Image: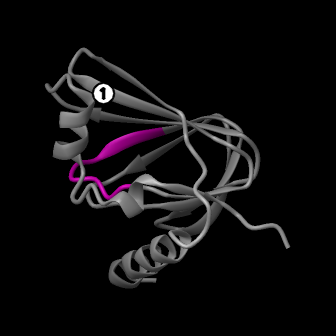
Amino acid sequence: MNDLSHNAAIDRLAEELLMVPQQPIPVRHFIKYGMATRVILIPEGTVVVGHRHRQGQHNFLMKGTIRVTTDDGVVDLHAPEVVLSPPGTQRAAISLTEVVWATTVVTDLTDPDEIFENVLYHPDPVQTLSFEEPTP
């Protein structure tokens, strides 16, 4: 799948997911030494659409198993794992177990909201949400 169709597919998924109940995702921020790390706890069975970032970043799967879109297609990742993302990357995923996922970016900013606004291409509310997968 090329980048354009990959991004269009993720955008379409995000639009569809807005039609189902939202799953709150706890977030913690660690900001120091010219880096900002955002750690999220994703409940099992939750579909997540990530943000499209302006800069490259390191992602750390610290706990659990997640099925995620990558440059190589959809893969199952098992903690511990590191995923490097070039600028412009956006991912969609479903947590197969409870997951702890961390994203680290380089920045001199210290306010989480300011970092959020400067690091993301479009801090669109569609991309800030996650969703429970409906049970059959």
Quarter of the figure with residue 93:
bottom right
> Residue 113: horizontal and vertical position, in percent?
24, 35
- When the figure is inspected, residue 17 is found, relative to residue 89, above or below; the finding is below
For badge 1, the amino acid type reads: Ala
- When the figure is inspected, residue 87 is found, relative to residue 109, above or below; the finding is below
> Residue 103: horizontal and vertical position, in percent?
42, 37
Magenta span of residues:
51-59
State left or right for residue 77 relative to residue 33. Answer: right
Q: Which residue is mark 1?
A: 36
Residue 53 or 136: which is nearer the viewer?
136
The quadrant of the rendering that contains the C terminus is bottom right
Residue lying furthest right in this view? Answer: 136
Q: Residue at x 28, y 47 (%)?
A: 56
Quarter of the figure with residue 25:
top right
State left or right for residue 52 relative to residue 59. Answer: left
- When the figure is inspected, residue 64 is found, relative to residue 111, above or below; the finding is below
> Residue 53: horizontal and vertical position, in percent?
28, 53
Q: Residue at x 35, y 58 (%)?
A: 125
Quarter of the figure with residue 15:
bottom left
> Residue 5: horizontal and vertical position, in percent?
40, 84
Q: Residue at x 46, y 66 (%)?
A: 71
